[in-house]
Amino acid sequence: MLEIKEITRNFDSFTALDKVSLSIEAGEFFTLLGPSGCGKTTLLRLIAGFDQPDGGDILLDGKSIIATPPERRPLHTIFQNYALFPHMTVADNIAFPLRMVGCKPDEIDQRVAEALEDVSLPDKGKHYPEALSGGQKQRIAIARALVNRPRLLLLDEPLSALDAKLREQMQLELIKLQQEIGITFIYVTHDQGEALALSHRIAVMNHGTIAQIDEPSRLYSYPNSRFVADFIGQCNLLAGTVEQIQNDRVRVELKGLGPVQTVIPPNATIEAGMACTLTLRPEKIRISSTLTQDEGEVHLKGVVHDMLYLGDVTVYKVELANGMLVEALLANSSAGRARFFEVGDQVEVAWGFEAGHLVMD
Amino acid sequence: MQTKHWQQRLLTLPPMSYLLIFFAVPTVIMLFASFRYAGEYGGLAPWYSYEEGKLAFDLTLENWQRLFETDIYLRLFAKSIGYAVLTTLLCILLGYPLALMIARSPRKHRDLLLLLVILPFWSNFLVRIYAWMIIFSPSGALTHMINSLLDIFGLAPISLMYSPTAVIVCLVYVHLPFMVLPLYANLEKHDPALLDAAQDLGATRWRRFWKITWPISLPGVYAGSILVFIPVLGMFAIPDLLGGTDGIMIANVIKQQFVESRDWPFGSVLSMVLTVAAVLAVLLGAKFGQQAGQTR
Ligand SMILES: Nc1ncnc2c1ncn2[C@@H]1O[C@H](COP(=O)(O)OP(=O)(O)OP(=O)(O)O)[C@@H](O)[C@H]1O
Ligand SMILES: [Mg+2]
């Protein structure tokens, strides 16, 4: 539905977006995820029309919208500070886009009431925005943007101003709303947890380019680079070189730790001698005090360096032979057993051959 | 709580006593004077006499009756209010685009532009009016240009000097900064995201101005209007110097009563009416401004 073709945007000598290409399907919840300053807002403003690209094209249903001014693009933006009009009631705010296209008064009243119903604030129509809480303002902004059924909704970090609890609630509401109305969402965030929870697909951005586009679960399990592995969730990154390839197995020489076996990553070009990084999620690492002998596993010795009790889980940081710290998660399934190990304990770190995911540097 | 109240009162003491001494007390004296007789050689006659053990008050309603005897004074009031309204509107018309332009210009230029707006204050008020007298003078370049233009179309030459036009132009010139400054203070605070949001929701440039910028700026418009309307209503120097006989305003007559006719009681009557008109204007402006401010 929306196609972005090699979009480039330069600010003076600084390249904020470098030949970014994307294709978004109708009805999709698509997220742009990346660290601060990677160009997410810049890309969103180009799609909305507030800014013009220095190169490339944006197609909506196959037609270029580059020359269309923002007020005539069939898409709306949710701004980070909501941008509700302070001098209008909530109802007038929501009626605004309808008035701009010259709807009839009865139709406006009806659709405003429906929109308020949609965001579960049916009796707030007569209030002014300043009388609303942050979460309510957020919902009114969404109601206003959706009332005349745009093709596309752009959301720039819409939940960043809310506290954690409310944010989680609004995330669930956003998912429900998007499913119900079936409008395509393009969502910007630098919060990877939020991106994983909400999206159908995520584009991870870095320095004005796209690092990887994939579904959340694939992005988490099969990052295509060190950057993505590190940015999405917690990850242990062990540097090494490819030594030998046999069938579906790779032998990797980890720096200062010796050879380990792992599986060949899907669709990667891999050759002996290449520099690589073994990415390991903390929840896939086991730690135990006794030496176990298991054929399908990697075993390394270490010392507990640090631990962090988080309630549901405890995070252990274990120092390996090469001085590197790896993180492992242990679930605290029963109350009395919050502490399996103490700082300074000699432990063994183990993971299955298929637990690690190899990325080429 | 107790100490806070006490401190608050102490803080408001200087401004309150200032208002009491320089506004409330003179107003009461003026109101009282409007019911007294004029003194033989100007000033006021005594307001009571004590003859043969009997106290008599020498107070009268004559002065107030005189106000309504002819329609001269009421018409002059109406005309002055008309001038003040016209000046205020022209100041909005000229000042609003200027304030908007300054508020939307790059931050580093704004201070300089504001400085230029208040630059005229650095020279004396009367000097600036004399400058206009030179510009409007029959031998001035402006008059020459206009009259030679009129001549081309076969029209009779006009005189700019000593006309209501000259008065209005000068009133607007003098009071424009008082409109621009509060407007700028308001417009500068507008969140630019509101205009982006309005555009995103389908509003054209024209609509964005009338639906967003203008209504949010109304408190600034009212504040500026009060600051222009009130002093214009009481202005006598400009009509004195530029107005001739046609361009005279009510304050000229008040000045005349006090200085030339030496009729203080009637001057007080006219002053009272002017004060009431000004207070009403302030209340009205404050009320609208507050309403507009509440809906922000
Ligand atoms: N108008 C501008 N002029 C100059 N540089 C700009 C402009 N807008 C953005 N940039 C630069 O472009 C880069 C990308 O900015 P952008 O706002 O898109 O980042 P972002 O990914 O949205 O970051 P954040 O998560 O902090 O919002 C930044 O380095 C920023 O400094
Ligand atoms: Mg941003």
Image (cartoon, rainbow, N blue to C red):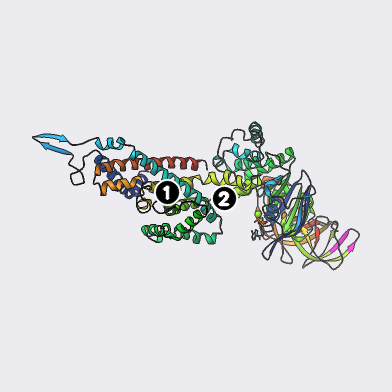
Q: Which residue is mark 1?
A: B228
Crowding at dot 2, Cα within 10 Å, few <14 / some 14-19 / many 20+, comes out as few
Residue B162: give x, y in percent of width and height: 38, 52
The secondary element bearing badge 1 is classed as helix
Whichever of callouts 1 and 2 sits on the residue coming sooner in the sequence is: 2
The secondary element bearing badge 2 is classed as loop
Q: Chain of mark 1?
A: B
B193 or A313, nearer to the observer: B193
Residue A276 seen in the figure: yes
Q: Is residue A110 left or right of residue A229?
A: left
Main secondary-structure element of the magenta-colored stretch: strand
Q: Residue at x 56, y 47 (%)?
A: B213
Residue A285 seen in the figure: no
Residue A8: give x, y in percent of width and height: 73, 59
A290 or B69, nearer to the observer: B69
B138 or B14, nearer to the observer: B138
Q: Which residue is mark 2?
A: B191
| Residues rendered magenta in the picture | A245-251
Crowding at dot 1, Cα within 10 Å, few <14 / some 14-19 / many 20+, comes out as many
Instruction: Give the residue type that dot 1 points to.
Output: Val
Q: Is residue B265 left or right of residue A338?
A: left
Q: Nearer the viewer, mark 1 or mark 2?
A: 1
Instruction: Give the residue type that dot 2 points to.
Output: Asp
